[in-house]
Image (cartoon, helix red, strand yellow):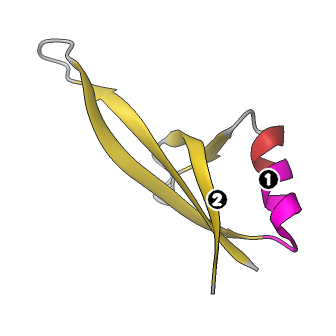
Amino acid sequence: MKFKFKGIASYEEPVNNYVGAVKNLSAVKEFGSFQEAIDYVANHKGFLMSEDGKSAFNVLTISEIE
């Protein structure tokens, strides 16, 4: 079963240290069950690596996809 994990991350602009803009992040992973997907996130303290591997994000939603 495939699951999509979604989250958002704020970023800091280097020029003026403004924090507030957000970037939507997501990742798709396969697990045997919904509970396994939840357990995976819980075991990683609520974080997941983005698909491009350049950042990690706090998971806000998990949904099954076909």
Q: Residue at x 53, y 40 (%)?
A: 57
Amino acid type assigned to the residue bearing label 1 in the image: Ile
Is 45 located above or below residue 60 in the figure? above
Name the quadrant of the N terminus.
bottom right
Name the quadrant of the C terminus.
bottom right
Q: Residue furthest top?
A: 16
Is 52 located above or below residue 22 in the figure? below
Amino acid type assigned to the residue bearing label 2 in the image: Ile
Is 15 located above or below residue 23 in the figure? above
Q: Specify the label residue 62 is tagged with.
A: 2
Q: Position of residue 13 (x, y in %)?
A: 20, 23
The segment highlighted magenta reads 31-39
Q: Earlier in the sequence, mark 2 or mark 1?
A: 1
Q: Position of residue 64 (x, y in %)?
A: 67, 73
Q: Residue at x 59, y 53 (%)?
A: 61
Q: Is residue 29 left or right of residue 25?
A: right
Q: Which residue is mark 1?
A: 38
